[in-house]
Image (spheres, rainbow, N blue to C red):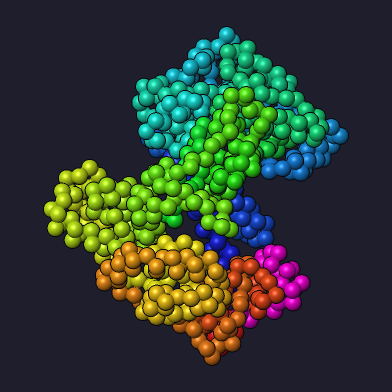
Amino acid sequence: MDDFEKIKEEFLDLKAKIKHHDTLYYTNDKPAVTDAEYDDLRARLVEIEGEFPQLKLIGSVQENVGSEPDSRFKKIQHKKPMLSLDNALNLQDIEKFCAKVKRFLNIDEIELLCELKIDGLSFAITYENGALAYAATRGDGHVGEDITANVATLKDLPKVLNTGDTLEVRGEIYIDRDDFIDLNKDNEFANPRNVAAGSIRQLDPKITASRPLKYCAYSITNCKEETQYEMLRKLKELGFCVSNNIAVVKTIDEIADFYNKIYSSRHSINYDIDGLVYKVNNLKLQERLGSTSRAPRWAIAHKFPAMVAKTKLNKISIQIGRTGVLTPVAELVPVNIGGVLVSRASLHNKNEIERKDIREGDIVIVQRAGDVIPQVIEVDKDSRSAEVQKFVFPSSCPECGSSICKTEGEVALRCMGEFYCKAQLIEKLRHFVSKDAFDIVGLGKKQIEFFYSNGLITQISDVFFLEEKIKDLNFPLETSSGWGKKSINNLFNAIRSRKKIDLHRLIFALGIKFVGQKAAKLLTNYYNLYTNWYSSMKELTIDDLISIDGIGEKTVSSIKSFFSEKHNIEVLNKLISYLKISDSSYNNQNNESELNGKTIVFTGSLLHMTRSEAKAKAESLGAKVSSSLSTKTDYLVIGEKPGSKYKKAVELGVTILDEDKWLLLSSK
């Protein structure tokens, strides 16, 4: 496959993904990715189309707006397309937008109207001779779903206007955060936007009427006024709900002031907004600017950082992890961050709470990045009330009452009740069956807690004797809530299928403190066989393991502590009686390879194999794969768009291999 065919394949894959996510978001109201992740997909598509314009002949989803209307509803053709908006992520993007508008119009100054970008469902409602005639969703921008009966249930929406004109009003339907919390007591919905969109698409208008929906009107398509500002005033005169958070600006500084004002106070706005919208205020200039097939040239959305928001910290609760660590967790007033409703965030540890002076009742800034657990990064102390008191960390384990200790050199506080603290035992079991350990499908937290509370699984080895134990005790699992014959068979089959396991996965699954996946692989690589590893661990000395590159004193001490406990040895021996430990690919070092003992770092996108495949290949030849560069790095293997690691490798004098040279070297 040549380079163009690979790009074409990626292009088609991106098209399919974007179309899929459009349907999930616009039609099903169940987005599977964050706004930021979706924007990345579209950005990559734009990049490809820029480099290979011939691919546009296949058809670009960049020109699409929304998705096809839901077939359950009648279709309504929009007289004027309901377009999307181009996005700006910073003030530089806004400056470019303004410069482009001025250049297009050949003017030196432009006046913009700033308003909130509400995270809801767009709709258009048409009045004929002053009476409500029909309403539609955006749909694909040209054809929408008929939601007339449902829109008519909206509180404060005029059914008859004090004008005989025929006009179309557009706006956004949403739900307040407080109303969402009341409605979502059973955690049925993901976020307020999904509730609003799902409620307005009900086949039974009575269901729509039962939901606390609100709306905000923002335009009249056949407006007689001269400016966007006057249009909003006209909408208000006609009886429509409009936003009071608007501003007319002429400079970038004025835009920045309005943006900062809204961004810093968005937690006090009782509905979700994901940015601001700037529109050329003069409607005749809007007409001159026109639109592309997807977005108007006279408006742009200035999106907030997708992963940061302000909200109130209601309570600080303490969680106990599998190694006994006490982790404080912020219980928040739910807030939408990047399309995900966040109600809890990490506070890390006691020191972090004290350093940032985080208190129950504070207004806090919460950050969410990718799959990382949301965390409180700052307190808005200007909004702190006098009643808010300093948080007092517990002096004993809140789960089992055991004493708490702090190991020298560590920040974390730990519960000492390792073998009888329910919270620790539950977390150890969850870790044991997790994806990177034994990967047993059907044993989630709920199931583990069920079996633990019934005395069927109280230690990790019990997992593999569960079926036998249930039969011996004649436990009525099939008649228990949440269990049926099929789910029971699926669980037992999943457990049986994990009888054979690689050594590194077994070591990781044991949940020994400081022994993560990397350390487990290093130990496997060094000892080769389970019997070698087990016998060595029982008579371990510090010098034995520090000789392994990547294994430090803390890890050695933790392993010694684990194997010094008679209980752990008994559980492990019982577990091994059931399992077959297979040779691991990490043991198959090729001492004759030029890569044996070399340290390799990979960066950029490889064309002939995935990064994971390349790393596995390197390790099978005896190489050590690292994620960071240093003077000890032997080779940096670069793919497309290598980034900053390439520059650093040049500075350090590290040998750089392109993919062809890497393939040649690794095949010797």
Query: Relative to 199, does residue 33 appear above or below in the rendering?
Result: below
Visible residue check, residue 99: yes
Q: Indicate the position of residue 281 as horizontal and vertical percent values.
A: 74, 27
Q: Quadrant of the C terminus?
A: bottom right
> Is residue 556 or residue 664 the one in the foreground?
556
> Residue 57: which quarter of the image?
bottom right
> Is residue 128 or residue 597 the one in the foreground?
597
- Identified at 34% across, 52% down, the residue is 420
Q: Residue furthest bottom?
A: 592
- Identified at 31% across, 48% down, the residue is 449
> Is residue 131 or residue 396 the one in the foreground?
396
Q: How many marks?
A: 0
Q: Quadrant of the N terminus?
A: bottom right
Q: Indicate the position of residue 319 as horizontal and vertical percent values.
A: 45, 45
Q: Residue furthest right?
A: 108
Q: Which residues are magenta?
A: 640-662
Q: Residue furthest top?
A: 162
Visible residue check, residue 325: no
> Is residue 667 or residue 156 the one in the foreground?
667
- Identified at 41% across, 65% down, the residue is 562
- Identified at 23% across, 58% down, the residue is 466
Query: Relative to 319, does residue 537 appear above or below in the rendering?
Result: below
Q: Indicate the position of residue 434 as horizontal and vertical percent values.
A: 39, 58
In the picture, measured across the screen, residue 504 lies left or right of residue 659, that is: left
Query: Relative to 274, does residue 51 appear above or below in the rendering?
Result: below
Q: Is residue 522 magenta?
A: no
Q: Indicate the position of residue 653 as horizontal and vertical percent values.
A: 74, 77
In the picture, measured across the screen, residue 570 lies left or right of residue 88, that is: left
In the picture, measured across the screen, residue 644 lies left or right of residue 5, that is: right
